[in-house]
Amino acid sequence: MSVEMNTGHATSALPPFRTVLVANRGEIACRVIATLQRLGIEAVAVYSDADRGAKHVALADLAIRIGPAPAAESYLNVDAVMAAVRASGADAVHPGYGFLSESPLLAAACAKAGVVFVGPGEEALRVMGDKIRSKRHVAGHGVPVTPGSEGHGSEGGVDSTDDAALAASAELLGYPVLIKPSAGGGGKGMHLVDSPEALPAALASARRTARAAFGDDTLFLEKFIAHPRHIEVQLLADGAGHTVHLGERECSLQRRQQKVVEEAPSPLLDAATRARIGEAACAVARSVGYVGAGTVEFLISDAAPDEFYFMEMNTRLQVEHPVTELVTGIDIVEWQLRVAAGQELPWRQEQIRLDGHAVEARIYAEDPASDFLPTSGRVLALAEAHGPGVRVDSSLLPGGEIGSHYDPMLAKVIAWAPDRASALARLDAALAHTVILGVDTNLAFLRGLLADPAVQAGALDTGLIARHLDAQATKSRAAAARVPGARAAAAQPAPPTDTAPAPALLGEMLAVAGALLHAEAPAAAGSPWQDRSGWRTGGAAAARPEALLVRHRGERAGAQAETAFEVRVVARSAGADHTAGGMTDHLTEHLAVAVRERGAEDGRMSAHTVSIAPAATAPSRATGVHVGIAVDGVQRRWSWARDGEDLLLSVEGESTRFTAVSREAELQGELARILAARAEQEGGVAASPELRTPTPGTVVQLHAASGDAVAAGAPIATVEAMKMEHQVTASVAGTVRLHVRLGDALRRDQLLASIDAQTPGQRQEIGNE
């Protein structure tokens, strides 16, 4: 992190604890460990079997296994965590966020064992951990709350386990209403319901999610406020009764109630409203004798920014706490520790100053083009942002496996600058610098969101992302309508979307892919029979440029589709780049690359000149990170990695995947398509010979081997994802070619197997076996 934090005036120079166990994983465990080690405190990590090679395990001074991969048997298991506390001799437990961070059971277990729980007391956890109880509690202390089901029926509100009672409450509140789990947070289990007909299914889904995530399926309803802004206030309180707020954070950029981009301070609030909402948050904390770091969340109507309503209090560290740290200079984790050790806060409220502006973007393992479904895979190439005003809190390691057991957030990129516009620009540049290859992420979506005019203007509300996605989809459809055949490489540039490279950039990517794949083949070694230029007898007139076939799967006309491209390296030359003083700097190879979409209406080829240093593309180099490659005289920093038959490319925050198709595979695929088309004509069933995974997951069983003859509908493999098994079956009769192995972690839509389709007579033979 390039921005220094002022740690305040500690009441003791000694470390507040000797050993602290971090009862969490991922980026928050890494972030807490960083402060522990800066303070000279021994850091103890815990890990499940899925996290044995995780970054937080490597960073800690000591790491202890607490169970198998499922969270219920590891990170949510109080007994397992306390066993690790005893084994490590820790004198305090920091719970991070999520998992057991707001668990009265863990706090009670720590108290019983004589270990400090770095968080509030059990009473505050119980009152504020129950969203229904907390709303009634703060309303009794004069804090305005959003109208909800807890205000109907008897003094305790409606029966939150009775769907009929909640339905009656919804009628009183008036639609739309928001369903929320009483015990939860982070957007899990929340549903916006627009009509009585949609309520039963939404309640059932919310109860299932709440039961799985929090072990408690109690629900309540809130009146949905149109165009709301989500603004929260960060608090610190000590055991001597001192409570201060560290300003507010704007968290309105959400997708399905999950925060995506946060900033501090809010562009909406003026100084007077900031003081009022801050004091209201402090009143909430004081009402339960709160000690530690906490956050009070409010809803504010954009039409009436001086009116705010209490939503809930999060009795823990928040994901988005870094933006507050950067504008205040206060290490919130350090003061969690010091307050838990009995030290007093060194500031009065008037001493807290906000300096500049900070914005955070969350990087998720998810596929925006597939409705943001979680993704998985192995990190094949990694470059994280750095520089003045840039901070990255990350759980990523090169070669690390990204599975489907836990929350898909991988990292947070935070940028600070003296003003909001500069902070947004700095964050965008940091995201452009970030490279994560091997697992699909939302990086390109984040950059598109930051460029939205409403985001730039600070005109935010919780529905903005949904409108942004709708607008991007409309642009994509309009662009496809303007381009005959939806040509990608040779078409005129169309407005880019957040989920796919713009056509012009895709053309550059194809040219670079051709150059990289061209460099992979063995050198000619002086033999004309090995010369990859296409030499043949008959002289130069008979020379034929080498053609490569690559497939690209991406958005076309608003839907996911696969397109085949021919990429030809038609000429190559070598030259020397020179420094300003005329001295040779390094050799550069210049490749003339032609790209054509197979099957395009006009069959035109787009020509590009790719200039690259041969050393950067040596066959032994499977990955490259931020390598300067020029396309048509414009040099960018490109990154790439090979993933089996696939080539992954990234430039300026845009990533895509190409599949290199051998001549043999091309002919086999063409034959399979011909036979499948014939089968469709004869049997009336349309089927693709390629079998792809329906969801990210792990191959837990293979039912066939390469070369096996199978009938249509025969099981080929079983993929496990999110505790559910998905069986992939043969789409047509034929011979199997597997592209995965048992135990492989798969991304969504990954090619699992191909079926070389059989003729009707051969299908009959298979059926008779």
Image: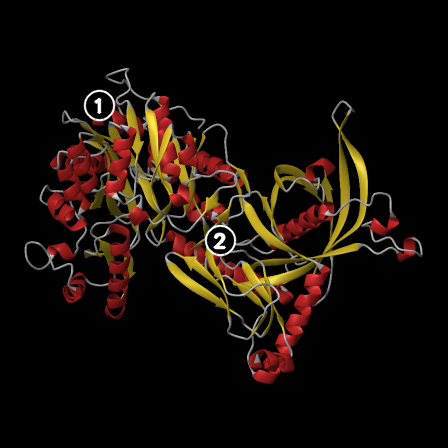
- Where does the N terminus fall, quadrant-wise? top left
Q: Report which quarter residue 712 is drawn in.
A: bottom right
Q: What secondary structure is found at the residue carrying circle 2?
A: loop
- Against 167, residue 421 (above or below) is above
- Against 485, residue 417 (above or below) is above
Q: Report which quarter residue 107 is drawn in.
A: top left
Colour mapping: secondary structure
Label at residue 743: 2
Q: Amino acid at mark 1?
A: Leu
Q: Looking at the image, is mark 2 or mark 1 earlier in the sequence?
A: 1
- Against 208, residue 462 (above or below) is above
- Against 768, residue 636 (above or below) is above
Label at residue 345: 1
Please tell me whether mark 2 or mark 1 is closer to you in this view: 2
Whether residue 599 appears in this view of the structure is no
Q: Residues within 10 Å of mark 2 (few under 14, many from 20)?
A: few
Residue found at x 24% / y 58%: 179
Please, which residue is most extreme toward the left here?
Answer: 155
Whether residue 447 appears in this view of the structure is yes
The image position of residue 684, as x and y in percent, is 56, 83
Residue found at x 35% / y 47%: 68
Residue found at x 76% / y 56%: 547
Q: Nearer the viewer, residue 755 or 67?
A: 67
The image position of residue 499, as x and y in percent, is 51, 54
Q: Nearer the viewer, residue 267 or 412?
A: 412
